[in-house]
Every structure is written in structure tokens, then in C-alpha cells.
Image: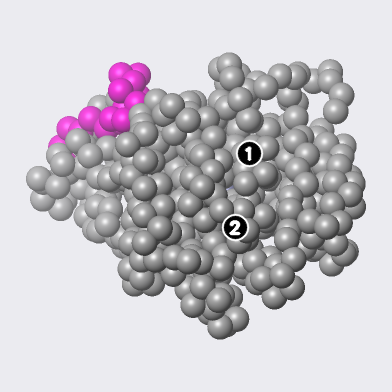
Amino acid sequence: MRIAIGSMMHESNTFNKLTTGLETFNLADGDEFLQVQGWKGTVIDGIYNTLKEAGAEIGPMFFARAIPSGAVRLDAYEYIKARMIDKLRRSGPWDGVCLALHGSMAVEGLYDPEGDLLEAIRWEVGHEIPVVCALDMHATVTERMALLSDGYAAYRTAPHEDEAETGTRAASILLRSLAKGRKTVNAFVKIPLLVSGEQSETRVDPAKSLFEALAGYDALPPVLCASYVMGFPWADSPFGGAGALVTGWADDVEPLKELAKKVALNFWEKRAEFVYSAMALPPEQALQAALAFEKRPVIISDSGDNPTAGASQDTTNFLRLMLESGVRNAVYTCIADPRAYRECSAREIGETFPLTVGGYYSGKESERLSLSAELIARAESQGTAYAVMRARGVTFVVSNGRCATYDPRTLRGLGLAPETYDLIAIKAGYLSPEYQAMSELSILAHTKGDTALELRRLPYVKTPRPIYPLDIEMSF
Ligand SMILES: [Zn+2]
């Protein structure tokens, strides 16, 4: 049994106008991915281990993963696709293909890159062997994707804590299909709904109950795996919106279609209940609420500029507010600005100097903040370099490139103990489990940026209408 595996994962924020080139991707060719630390515990790890335990001969193709950002440049996508197809062609024949895709990638000139990739793979391997994919739960699935893959398994937790399990579920669909010599198929029902991750955390209802119910459906023959794919609201796409995706045996398709309709309707009926699980306030009120709260630490998400949903990570509007508010013993992480970092890297620790920070990627003059600040520390972590600065009671971090900020280990790696601050402000949406556990109160500040939470204010043009909540009065 020879199975090809590969991965292409990028969540593309089309409201961030800065496009994403190949240099942004973490790439691995063939077996190399086993050596790359960043793949451990991820969906591809789950796929690999499950296939290996089943005694499969695994043929790693090509792996590409990047932090969310603006739409991917066409040449970068074509390169990734060509590397995958080339490996499929040169190392075949195959008994199956198992992929880890995000599902909400946008490529300049292509509205449906995952569908395009699957089409190229089908031309290469044909329709006789199974092709099964794992997806992020924020995937924007198209009819073409549903047709061209034999099965899907999407994450069931947000924050995503079941990546490896999802890989296992995807690989298991493929293994069961091969063991029985029986084809599988997808039933897909689109749900005309835009919902942000901050309104659909799975530790609270309605997402909790909806996603927990899926495991029960998996056990109902002829179903193999039921998934919700919620789409990605910070992308303007003609395929925008959520969906219900049910994979099962192809020779018993009617119950799959019925179930897909039923679970889609279950989701739709809860549409008005998807609300923020944290307190959500305009930025000024968020700061006032934090200052007035008696317990510490309070964590505020600067949610309009969340790099893990593809924002530019270079706004300073919330840091500016913090500096003006008189807040003391606060930490802010982190502004990506290579130009400001360069300035910091040329200075001595303990030196106070004038610094201009922000607006580097977006080019927005209004986000450029000039201030006098002291350099506290410099450090490197996972390929990103950081400078820790302090001004007027606020410790803030500047990095030499865009990076994830949701893990408190980043601050610890810079010699800072986040739990000792009264206020921790993070460029993030919903909090990671670690920050969630640390916070006495968490607040989503409705700040400006590419991931602004008020979806009704975003300039959607291509997204199909009517869609909730842009159009409230509508039926499904
Ligand atoms: Zn996601």
C-alpha cells in the first residue's frame, strides 16, 4: 500500500493588500518535513503516524505552510503545486493520496486554489484511487473541492487543539476505503453565513454543542466523517460562507445528503447565537474596563490586527491608547516592523532613543507612532528577532517580521513573565488556552485593522449575497 502525502496550508486575508511570496512559506521537500520541528503535533503528523501504524509505505511529496497573511502570489502557488505534482509523477504508482490543506487560501488570479490543486492531482493520479484531505475548520469549501476529493475531515476545536486527531480521521477514511475496496464520496451543503472565530470558540455554545455532535454522526452508517467548515470572514470570495460536509460510502449516498442538510440546518438555526465568548468593547472602553477591574492580569486582544488571521500586524492605534491612558505595568505584544527593529538592533541595552514604529507593511502613515523608548532586551525565537522596549509604564515588543503572538512562551523567551503584568495586550483574536488560563478577565477590543471584528463594516464585493449577518432578513 503506497500512499502519497503532502500539505499546502495558508489562510489568506484578502483585506490585507500585501501579497504573500514563497519566502514566507515554511517548505519541506519529501522526508525533510520529518526533521522540521514546526510539523510536530500538526495535522500532517497525525496523517503520517496513522498511515505508518497501518503499515503503509509513505511517499512524502511537498509541504508548504505559512502564517496567515494577504493573498498568495501566483508564482508561489504554482511552484508549490508543481513540486507536488512532480513528486506524484516521478514516484508513482500510488494506492492513495492524503493531503493536509487549510481550505481558505486565496491566490492572485485564482478564486479556488485548493480546488485547482485537487484538479491537477486528479489529472495526475486519476479517479480510481482515493484522495482524502484534512482541512482547517475555517476552510472555505467549494463544490469543486467536494467533487474532486473522496473525503474530508476538518478540525473540531477552536482554538485548534485537535490537529493531529484530524489528520488521523482523514487518514482513516482513506485506509477504510482501501481496506474495503469501496469508494467514498462527499455530500456538501453551503450555509450562507459569515462567522468569525471569536464568535465560534468551541469551548462555549453554540459551537460547542454543534461540533461535539459531529462525532456521533461519524458512527452512523454510511457516514465516515461529518464536518463543519465555517469559512473565513476576512476574505472576500465568491465562495465565501460556511458549509456542512459529510463523507461516507459512495454506494449509499442519499443518507449522506440528508445528514448534510440536517447538520447545515442545525448550524443555520443557531446563527443569532454566535456571539463573542469574551467581553467585546470599543478600544477606549476596553482599556477603562481593564483599569477598573480589581484582579490581575487582564488580557486585551487588539483584535483588528490579528496576525493569526492574516492582518498586517503593524498597527499602533491600541498601543497609542495604552500610552495615553496612564496605564502602568502593562505589556503589549507585538508590532512587526523590520525598519524599527533595525533601529533597535543598532542600540545598546538600556539606551533611550527616539523610535518610529508601525505602518511598515500596510504603508499607513496614521499607524506610524513616534516616541522615546528604552531598549530593555533583544532576543531571537523560532527565526524571528525581537526587541523589548519600554515607554511610560508600557513594555512593548517589536519584531523583525510578522509572527504569531498567541503563545505566552514568546514573551517568556524574551525574559518577560506575562503573569506579573496588570495588563497584557496581544495582537490576537480569541485567546490561546495558555493565555485563557492566565487571564482573570479577557476583553476583545474592537480595534482598527485587517481583521476588524465588525463584519458588517468590511468592504465585501465578491462574497455571495444574501449572506448572514450582512443581510439579516433572509431565509435558507
Ligand atoms: Zn482555523
Judge from the rendering whether residue 458 lies leftward or rightward of residue 68; answer left or right.
Answer: right
Residue at the (36%, 48%) spot, across then down: 82
> In the picture shown, does residue 359 fall above or below 1?
above
Q: What residue is rendered at 29% in x and 60% in y?
A: 381
- Magenta stretch in the rendered image: 352-367
- The x, y position of residue 59, in whole percent, is 44, 69
Q: Position of residue 40 (x, y in %)?
A: 45, 69
Could you say whether the residue bearing mark 1 is in a helix, strand or loop? Answer: helix
Quarter holding residue 78 = top left
Q: Nearer the viewer, residue 199 or 210?
A: 210
**Which numbered tag is attached to residue 144?**
1
On whether residue 284 falls in the magenta region, the answer is no
Q: Is residue 392 visible?
A: no
Give the quadrant of the C terminus: top right
Left of 161 or right of it: where is 447? Answer: left
Give me the disc on residue 131.
2
